[in-house]
Amino acid sequence: QVQLVESGGGLVLPGGSLRLSCVYSGSGFRISGMGWYRQAPGKERERVAVLTAADTTNYADSVKGRFTISRDNAKRTVYLQMNSLKPEDTAVYYCHREYPDPFVWGQGTLVTVSS
């Protein structure tokens, strides 16, 4: 059974950086497409970044040029490097296995961008 555990959230000043980690337990990491999503208070969950098993990426327009998704297959970990953070990036960030089925969500990690 696949499980995802995120870490790395916290409080950061505007303009600052954070790196989120998502540790994958279970089989199939190398063939999995992985994604990061976020949900701000009162808003719907939105996709932030996706990384395929072939290492192609796709980003939401709101984070292009600021966020980078990557993976370390040896560590079974997916990262989200977040730079130039803005208050509107404040949200709970979730790791997600995009494919293969079944879809799996992590428990989320809170990122707060505030002065």
Image (tube, rainbow, N blue to C red):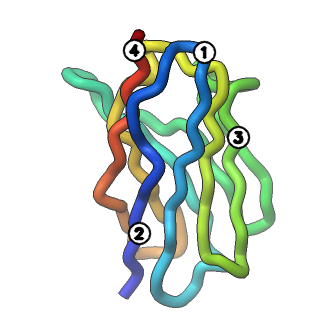
Q: Which residue is mark 3?
A: 68
Q: Are marks 3 and 2 in contact (CB under 8 Å)?
A: no
Camera-nearest label, 4 or 2: 4
Q: Are marks 2 and 1 in contact (CB under 8 Å)?
A: no
Spatial distance from mark 3 to mark 2, Cα to Cα?
19 Å
Q: Which residue is mark 1?
A: 15
- Helix, strand or loop under label 3: strand
Earlier-in-chain disc, 3 versus 1: 1
Where residue 4 sits: x, y (%)? Answer: 41, 69
Q: Is residue 64 above or below residue 99?
A: above
Q: The residue under label 1 is which amino acid type?
A: Gly
Q: Quadrant of residue 110?
A: top left
Spatial distance from mark 4 to mark 1, Cα to Cα?
10 Å
Earlier-in-chain disc, 4 versus 2: 2
Q: The residue under label 4 is which amino acid type?
A: Ser
Residue drawn at x 67%, y 47% is 69
Earlier-in-chain disc, 2 versus 1: 2
Residue drawn at x 49%, y 18% is 13
Camera-nearest label, 3 or 4: 4
Q: Are marks 3 and 1 in contact (CB under 8 Å)?
A: no
Q: Which residue is mark 2?
A: 4
Spatial distance from mark 3 to mark 1, Cα to Cα?
16 Å
Q: Quadrant of residue 90?
A: top left
